[in-house]
């Protein structure tokens, strides 16, 4: 009886010529793939770690290149965190404070506006709440500010685009971390890490160093960007400015790329233009490659957008809805104050 081959195409699973020096793990059975790296300040720092971390003797130019790469990395981190903190302190916090007690209680105001016994009456005529004329004026002014036409649509669109951009940054970071983890491990200090501008294997301690220095700070900054950017969009009060703020947020994400393009040496541009990472991972899922990944990513972006608006900051849409409910039955003199 003829025996079938274990692999569909054994030639696809041949290891590299130097595979005898690699550790015996399950990933060595998978075909090698290669990925390119982004051109930004983060990747330049990662490249400096990969190329020169274990070299006993470095030339003067190599030492200076490593120092400049790490300086560019630090400048990028300082600029991104510094700008985020300035936006949070001087822009977002004052906007958020205007919608929180003791300045203004949106939940109490929403309950007042939804009072069914207020039909055709002013807010001072509520039988359930004691409302002064000053409080009524404040509630109506907040309705005018927080419930303009087109505001919710602008926030929904810009928040979806912002979540899409942040999810892309996080996905790129996760993909890089995952592929570095699936690189062949080096078990001999004499084994070359990089061959022909390709990372062919990696040390375990270098892998953890790259996670600590590059991947983890990238993830932390992405999360901070998402939180601050979402607040900046959600607490906006003018549709046009909401769109401008959403577009301005894109600048914060591209600081690392801008710094690299402006200040990186020609050597860094040349290295990243041709540098690749060789990794071994299991067989791809055809459904995921054809359409599954697109549906999943879109669903995550839409889900995070809905979660942000209707769960994290549910007070705002609830108050706007209450303003609309009261406006339907309010006297004309009151409706004029709400527009």
Image (tube, rainbow, N blue to C red):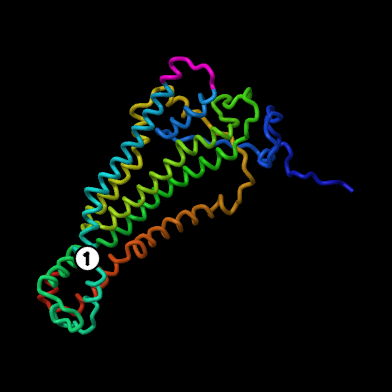
Q: Quadrant of residue 304?
A: bottom left
Q: Is residue 196 above or below residue 85?
A: above
Name the residue carrying label 1.
147
Count of residue discs: 1
Asked if residue 339 is among those painted magenta in the image, a careful observer would answer no
Question: What residue is shown at x 39% (from left), y 23% (from top)?
Answer: 265
- Boundaries of the magenta span: 55-64
Question: What residue is shown at x 49% (from left), y 53% (from top)?
Answer: 294
Q: Is residue 282 above or below residue 54?
A: below
Q: Nearer the viewer, residue 103 or 110?
A: 103
Q: Nearer the viewer, residue 5 or 216?
A: 216
Asked if residue 63 is among those painted magenta in the image, a careful observer would answer yes
- For this orientation, the residue located farthest to the top is 60
Residue 264 in picture, x, y percent from top left:
38, 26
Task: State the quadrant of the C terminus.
Answer: bottom left
Residue 190 is left or right of residue 132, and the answer is: right
Residue 58 in picture, x, y percent from top left:
49, 17
Question: What residue is shown at x 20% (from left), y 64% (from top)?
Answer: 102
Residue 286 is left or right of residue 1, and the answer is: left
Please, what secondary structure does the residue beneath circle 1 have?
loop
Residue 329 in picture, x, y percent from top left:
19, 80
Residue 235 is left or right of residue 274, and the answer is: left
Residue 127 in picture, x, y percent from top left:
18, 84
- For this orientation, the residue located farthest to the right is 1
Q: Residues within 10 Å of mark 1 (few under 14, many from 20)?
A: many
Q: Nearer the viewer, residue 154 or 245?
A: 245
């Amino acid at each position: 009886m003829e025996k079938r081959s274990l692999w569909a195409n054994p030639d696809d699973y041949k290891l590299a010529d130097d595979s005898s020096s690699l550790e015996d793990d399950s990933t060595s059975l998978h075909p090698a793939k290669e990925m390119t790296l982004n051109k930004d300040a983060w990747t330049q720092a990662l490249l400096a770690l990969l190329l020169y971390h274990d070299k006993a003797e470095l030339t003067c130019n190599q030492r200076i290149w490593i120092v400049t790469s790490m300086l560019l990395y630090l400048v990028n981190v300082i600029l991104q965190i510094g700008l985020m903190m300035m936006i949070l302190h001087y822009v977002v916090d004052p906007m958020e404070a205007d919608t929180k007690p003791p300045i203004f209680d949106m939940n109490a105001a929403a309950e007042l506006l939804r009072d069914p016994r207020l039909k055709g009456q002013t807010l001072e005529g509520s039988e359930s709440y004691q409302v002064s004329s000053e409080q009524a004026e404040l509630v109506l002014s907040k309705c005018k500010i927080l419930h303009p036409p087109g505001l919710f649509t602008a926030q929904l669109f810009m928040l979806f685009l912002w979540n899409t951009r942040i999810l892309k940054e996080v996905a790129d970071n996760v993909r890089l971390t995952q592929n570095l983890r699936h690189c062949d491990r080096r078990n001999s200090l004499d084994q070359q890490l990089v061959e022909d501008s390709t990372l062919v294997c990696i040390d375990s301690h270098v892998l953890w160093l790259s996670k600590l220095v590059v991947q983890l700070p990238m993830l932390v900054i992405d999360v901070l960007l998402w939180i601050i950017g979402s607040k900046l969009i959600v607490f906006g009060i003018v549709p046009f400015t909401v769109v401008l703020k959403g577009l301005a947020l894109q600048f914060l994400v591209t600081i690392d790329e801008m710094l690299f393009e402006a200040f990186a040496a020609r050597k860094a541009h040349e290295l990243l233009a041709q540098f690749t990472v060789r990794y071994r991972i299991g067989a791809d899922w055809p459904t995921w490659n054809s359409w599954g990944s697109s549906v999943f990513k879109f669903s995550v972006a839409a889900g995070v957008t809905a979660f942000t608006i209707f769960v994290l900051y549910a007070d705002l849409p609830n108050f706007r809805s209450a303003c609309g409910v009261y406006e339907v039955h309010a006297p004309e003199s009151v409706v004029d104050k709400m527009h």
